[in-house]
């Protein structure tokens, strides 16, 4: 990379992982579809085998469209923005899942018809969403390799993922329980050892293509009045650090679902786990509501289920809102 392009957005260890992935998984002339390609028939059958009670847990946070609640959210966002500006951050997207909903109601005699038009921010730290391969890139390329210019015309990884079908065994790792806390703090990012300990606690042998569901206590954190920082500000926050990101890459998950994001505890404030989207094509589902699911699985005496994450097939989409379901 030439000096005029600035510093490398990827740490050396990420470059090493990306190079190893390319040698092992990329086929010349074919686009790699990343971690979702690991979700095969065997992974789906492992997931189906976990459904014992016929119950379902939604892992989606509610998409807020009520004007009063949205006003409260904007007030919180403005207060948060002022806090980051005190730290020298001049620009900050609100990160609270901007949603614009226009509801159209028609009354025709005794008949009524309802419709709506919705516009939303597919990323941020509020709405549950699935990140596409065209979300994090480097060197004018998405994972694949797919040139970033394709996003202006025919980038189709979200369509491909939707048609592939993302359904596999989900394994819930309760990192907060392993640490013995209500929630993870910014001062102590989640480590590889803690992720491994949470896996050991499940008694499950993780297999390639499984979904990692990583609970860090965000619901309790927010219920206590804390506001989770936007990803637009390079400040430390609760989440998984570089050590944990390396562990995630090493176990070959089909996808990762989590509540807190990257801890950003490195000198450059980079997004260690999110950068795996580029390095290995990792499918990430951000901002999941995991507390109720963790409690339900614990009551049922299990840590696994059939995880279904079905994104909408939208060409050129960098991410979509999603309602992941865990059947157990």
Image: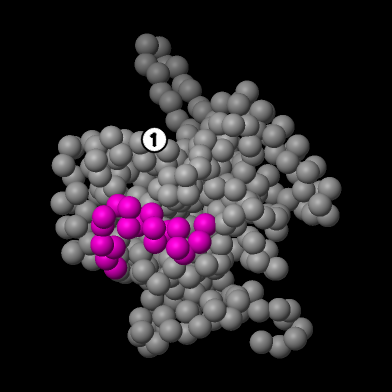
For the N terminus, which image quadrant? bottom right
Which residue is pictured at 69% across the width and 34% down the height?
A: 76
Q: In this rendering, is residue 248 above or below 186?
A: below
Query: Regarding mark 1 in the picture, which secondary structure is present there?
Result: helix
Please, which residue is most extreme toward the top here? 110
What number of labels is visible?
1
Q: How is the image coloured?
A: one colour
Asked whether 172 or 322 is in front, the reply is: 172
- Residue 194 occupies quadrant: bottom left
Give the quadrant of the C terminus.
Answer: top left
Residue 135 point in image, percent of width and height? 54, 63
Q: Nearer the viewer, residue 66 or 15?
A: 15
- The vertical placement of 291 against 138, above or below, is above
Please tell me which residue is depicted at 56% across the width and 26% down the height of the picture.
Answer: 66
Furthest toward the front, the residue is 180
Q: Which residue is mark 1?
A: 292
| Label 1 environment density (alpha carbons within 10 Å; few <14, some 14–19, many ≥20) | few
- Viewer-proximal residue, 137 or 275? 275
Q: Is residue 125 visible?
A: yes
Q: Residue at x 49, y 74 (%)?
A: 279
Residue 23 against residue 263 in the figure, above or below = below
Question: Left or right of 108: which side holds 99?
Answer: right
Q: Considering depth in this image, is 230 or 197 the residue closer to the camera?
A: 197
Indicate the position of residue 233 as horizontal and vertical percent values. 71, 54
Residue 127 visible at all: no
Q: Which residues are magenta?
A: 190-208
Image point (43%, 45%), residue name: 177
Q: Relative to 23, does residue 11 appear above or below in the rendering?
A: above
Q: Position of residue 201 (x, y in %)?
A: 33, 53
Q: Is residue 200 magenta?
A: yes
**Residue 206 shown in magenta:** yes
Residue 182, percent across and down? 51, 39
């Amino acid at each position: 990379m030439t000096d005029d392009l600035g510093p490398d957005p990827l740490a050396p260890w990420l470059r090493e992982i990306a190079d190893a992935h390319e040698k092992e998984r990329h086929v010349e002339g074919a686009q790699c579809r990343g971690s979702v390609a690991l979700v095969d028939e065997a992974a789906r059958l492992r997931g189906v085998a976990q459904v014992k009670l016929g119950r379902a847990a939604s892992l989606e946070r509610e998409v807020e469209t009520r004007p009063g609640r949205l006003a409260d959210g904007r007030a919180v966002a403005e207060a948060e923005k002022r806090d980051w500006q005190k730290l020298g951050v001049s620009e900050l997207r609100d990160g609270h899942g901007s949603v614009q909903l226009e509801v159209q109601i028609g009354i025709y005699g005794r008949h009524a018809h309802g419709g709506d038009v919705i516009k939303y921010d597919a990323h941020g730290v509020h709405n549950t969403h699935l990140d596409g391969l065209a979300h994090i890139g480097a060197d004018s390329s998405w994972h694949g390799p797919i040139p970033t210019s394709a996003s202006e015309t025919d980038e189709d990884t979200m369509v491909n993922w939707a048609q592939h079908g993302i359904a596999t065994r989900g394994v819930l790792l309760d990192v907060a329980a392993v640490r013995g806390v209500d929630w993870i703090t910014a001062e102590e990012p989640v480590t590889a050892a803690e992720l491994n300990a949470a896996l050991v606690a499940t008694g499950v042998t993780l297999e390639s293509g499984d979904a990692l569901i990583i609970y860090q206590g965000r619901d309790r954190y927010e219920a206590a009045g804390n506001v989770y920082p936007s990803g637009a500000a390079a400040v430390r926050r609760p989440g998984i650090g570089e050590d944990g990101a390396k562990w995630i890459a090493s176990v070959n998950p089909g996808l990762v679902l989590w509540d807190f994001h990257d801890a950003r505890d490195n000198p450059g404030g980079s997004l260690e786990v999110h950068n795996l989207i580029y390095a290995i094509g990792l499918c990430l589902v951000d901002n999941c509501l995991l507390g109720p699911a963790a409690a339900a699985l614990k009551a049922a005496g299990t840590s696994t289920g059939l995880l279904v994450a079905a994104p909408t097939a939208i060409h050129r989409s960098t991410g979509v809102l999603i309602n992941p379901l865990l059947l157990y």
